[in-house]
Amino acid sequence: MKQLRSAVFQPRAVPLAAWSRGQALAMTLSLGVCIWQRTTWPVVVSALCLFACLLMLGRRAHTPSGRFGLANAVTCMRLLVLLTLGLPPRWLEPWSALTITLLVLALDLLDGWLARRFADASAFGAHFDMETDALLVLIVTLRLWLGQGYPAWVLISGCLRYAYVLWLWAWPGPAAAREAPRSRLGRWAFTLLMLGLCLGLVLPGFAGRLAVALGTLVVSSSFARSGYFSRLAS
């Protein structure tokens, strides 16, 4: 019986890379519609559908034990909260958008702690967390562009994750390309980017744009390093 239970709860392989490629393609197309229509709803609807598919694909592999886990539940909550940032700009003042963004970042810290505390860390959970981070950046940059008059370059940081995944897919090279593992540098780059975006939500004029530009530069450098690791490093 014990062996049977172990077999039942054995985590199975989840096609995370394939899902990420589909996610990157769908979000790129959705972003194109957002730019054309000057709205955020295509990204929000696409994200809801795609993350629902991810949760279904990961059934019984959400955690090493097979249960869904508190950490993944908090990440789900984080995903739903950040999607409220896709409300029309006239419905959400900059300081309200900042409050929601800070709440999402606080939940990001909580889900990591829960995963470690309850031994629920898994490849699925790490991927779910990373893709939620990418969506947060995309939606905040869309808000800055649509609601606060930032130039289109503000969308660069929101596109980087998806461009990176599509690049690896389109240019596999002589051997299978693989994503660079998450590093301390990447985490610092994400932190500095989010600091810049948060300041951009509430600081007027040049100060806000400078903060966003610096955050974009830092995270672009991090993705350049990841690209070198993935395709060019020997």
Image: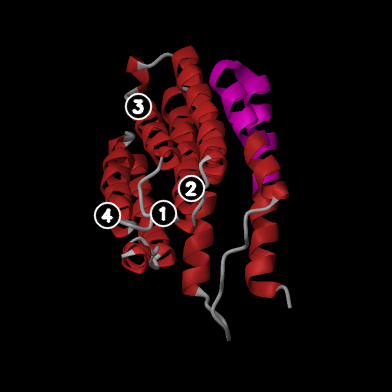
* Residue 76 in the image, given as x and y percentages of width and height: 37, 38
Could you tell me the amino acid type at mark 4?
Met
Residues packed near mark 1 inside 10 Å, few (<14), some (14 to 19) or many (20 plus): some
Q: Is residue 26 above or below residue 132?
A: below
For marks 3 and 4, the one nearer the N-term is 4
Q: How many marks?
A: 4
Looking at the image, the residue that sits furthest to the front is 1
| Callout 2 touching callout 1 (CB < 8 Å) | yes
Main secondary structure along the magenta-highlighted residues: helix
| Residue 18 seen from this side | yes
Image disc number at residue 84: 3
Residues packed near mark 2 inside 10 Å, few (<14), some (14 to 19) or many (20 plus): many
Q: Nearer the viewer, mark 3 or mark 2?
A: 2
Q: Nearer the viewer, mark 3 or mark 4?
A: 4
Residue drawn at the location 53% of the way across and 29% of the way down: 105
Could you tell me the amino acid type at mark 3?
Thr
Q: Nearer the viewer, residue 183 or 194?
A: 183
Residue drawn at the location 57% of the way across and 83% of the way down: 175
Image disc number at residue 56: 4
| Callout 1 touching callout 3 (CB < 8 Å) | no
Could you tell me the amino acid type at mark 2?
Asp
User: What's the CA distance linking mark 1 and mark 4?
Assistant: 17 Å
Q: Nearer the viewer, residue 223 or 210?
A: 223
Q: Which residue is mark 1?
A: 65
Image disc number at residue 120: 2
Secondary element at tag 2 = loop
For marks 3 and 2, the one nearer the N-term is 3
Q: Nearer the viewer, mark 4 or mark 2?
A: 2
Residue drawn at the location 33% of the way across and 62% of the way down: 5
Numbered range of the magenta stretch? 192-219
